[in-house]
Image (tube, helix red, strand yellow):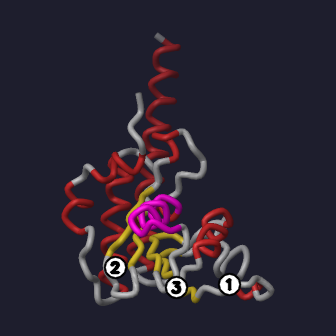
Amino acid sequence: MLLQPAYRLQQTPLYRSVLGTVIDDDEAAMQLALALADQAAEWQEVPVGALVLDERREIIGMGLNQTIYVQDPTQHAEIAALRDAAARRGNYRLPNCQLFVTLEPCMMCMGAILHARLQRVVYGASDPKTGVCHSVLKHEQYASLNHHTEIIGGVLAERCAQQLSAFFQARRAEQKQKKLSIKNEIRS
């Protein structure tokens, strides 16, 4: 039986050691999101990490990608962090809160961010394939929506992009090795 994704993350030393911590600057928050993404990579998930800070900049929610583990396409880091923060707050609305995430949010995550009424989103690496803040779509296109979230991209962008790139390079190398092994077995 699979554990619930929130429970799985909540059992990690990282989660237990930093929940409730106040983070004063954006780079420090992104460094923690990168540490969460490292945990996702360790679990063989795409390395994306996210955290929610309240109006005092206290960590009230954390998340990381767990789509494979949970077998759920909605289990992105942003969604997990929003769920964690909303449960802690006892409210699905998170006004005056900020989300930090290592990769530019996709359309699904941006929808959840807007519905949660977040004040601000800060992301690291751009996502030219599915990003809807500044890449595929631009947040200025959401002007007719009733809630507006400030969006800042590029915080520790190189480190965030490198983390993703290294993960996918390793995954491609593993797949290539598997194919070679299968070819060798067939020849034997």
> Would you call the spot at circle 1 few (<14 residues within 10 Å), some (14-19), or many (20 or more)?
few
Give the residue at x 49% y 84%: 154
Q: Which of marks 3 and 2 is in front?
A: 3
Please give the name of the residue rendered at 50% of the width and 41% of the height, measured from the top-left corner: 68
Around disc 3, counting alpha carbons within 10 Å, would you say few (fewer than 14), some (14 to 19), or many (20 or more)?
A: many
Q: Mark 1 points at which residue?
A: 147
Type of the residue with mark 2: Ala
Frontmost of labels 1 and 2 is 1
Question: Is 137 drawn above or below residue 19 in the view shown?
Answer: below
With 176 as the anchor, is 6 left or right in this view?
A: left
Q: Name the element at disc 2.
A: helix
Query: Can you tell which quarter of the image residue 108 is in?
Result: bottom right
**Which quarter of the image is occupied by the N terminus?**
top left
Q: Which of pointers 3 and 2 lies earlier in the amino acid sequence?
A: 2
Q: Residue furthest top?
A: 188
Q: In this view, does 124 lie to the left or right of 139?
A: left
53 in magenta: no
Q: Where is residue 93 in the image (x, y as percent from the top left)?
A: 55, 73
- The stretch of residues the image draws in magenta is 79-91
Query: From what the image shows, is residue 71 above or below residue 1?
Result: below
Q: Which is nearer the N-term, disc 1 or disc 2? A: 2
Kindly identify the amino acid type of the residue bearing the numbered disc 3: Arg
Residue 143's place in the image compared with 127, above or below, is below
Who comes first in sequence, dot 1 or dot 3? 3
Disc 1 and disc 2: Cα gap in Å? 24 Å
Q: Return the residue at label 3.
A: 120
**Residue 135: mark in rendering:** none
Q: Name the residue under label 2.
A: 29
